[in-house]
Amino acid sequence: MSTPKQASWIVKKIFDAREWLRQNNPTETLNNFCKKGKFCIKKVYTASRPKYQKCNWKRLTIASKAIPRHQFILWLALHRRLATVERLQKWGIVVSKDCVLCRSNAKETFDHLLFDCAYSRTMWSKILRWAEVKHQIGSWDEEISWIAKVAVNRSKGEILAFLFTAVVYHVWNERNNRRFQGKEITCSKRIKEIIQMLHIRGQSVENWKKELEQLNSYPS
Ligand SMILES: [Zn+2]
């Protein structure tokens, strides 16, 4: 029976679907959506959702216990959206290209700031040593892969993710202070601030308490 011309759109849809079923015989396809012989709507839903590339740093943002303003800067960094000199140049804004943090005549690029630069590398390595973590600091992409894996661990992983997020924020903040306000804060002063913030934040996170009791000192 052909689709009645006067039928409502829903009836037409039903007729069209019947015709489609007749032509395509989807029994085999439907079997893919069965579990123990029963049709499983969850499987259809999963199959119908668009497939995106897995994002390895999801935990650093969604499940993060870091300070929100730190998280925001990390999020920008994860998308390589920080307005570094190389990016400013693309927008036609001309500023000095030299890195204001290490003053080694190195050019300020995203990858230099995080973590080729002596300033950011010192900050992150001192904090890692203080947290009693042995880790060879690599490039930005390597650090993201490493911290994303570590962050899965509750308590210590969450603490390290907090610290990493804070380091990214403080490096960027120091760069902006020096470049636009002419102010300078030493690396060790910023490290102390990060540790203080960690302990303050830790007071409201039950599963950090044991770890933080052992880390109850300032980095040397
Ligand atoms: Zn530098």
Image (cartoon, helix red, strand yellow):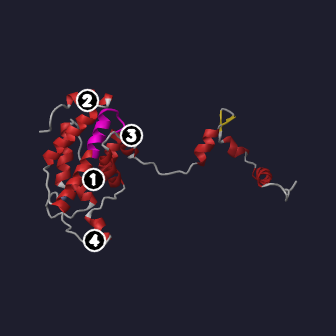
Place of residue 115 in the rendered image (x, y in percent of width and height, measured from the top left): 24, 53
Closer to the chain start, of discs 4 and 2, is: 4
Res 93 label: 4
Which residue is the site of mark 3?
Answer: 63
What type is the residue that disc 1 sits on?
Answer: Ser
Q: Which marked residue is nearer to the observer: mark 2 or mark 1?
A: 2
Q: CA distance from mark 2 to mark 1?
A: 28 Å
Q: Label 1: state its secondary structure.
A: loop
The C terminus appears in which quarter of the rendering?
top left
Q: CA distance from mark 3 to mark 4?
A: 36 Å
Closer to the chain start, of discs 2 and 1, is: 1
What type is the residue that disc 4 sits on?
Answer: Ile
Q: Label 2: state its secondary structure.
A: helix
Place of residue 162 in the rendered image (x, y in percent of width and height, measured from the top left): 29, 41
Ligand 1 sits in quadrant: bottom left
Q: For the point 31% across and 43% down, which residue is it?
A: 147
Mark 4: few, some, or many residues within 10 Å (few <14, many ≥20)?
Answer: few
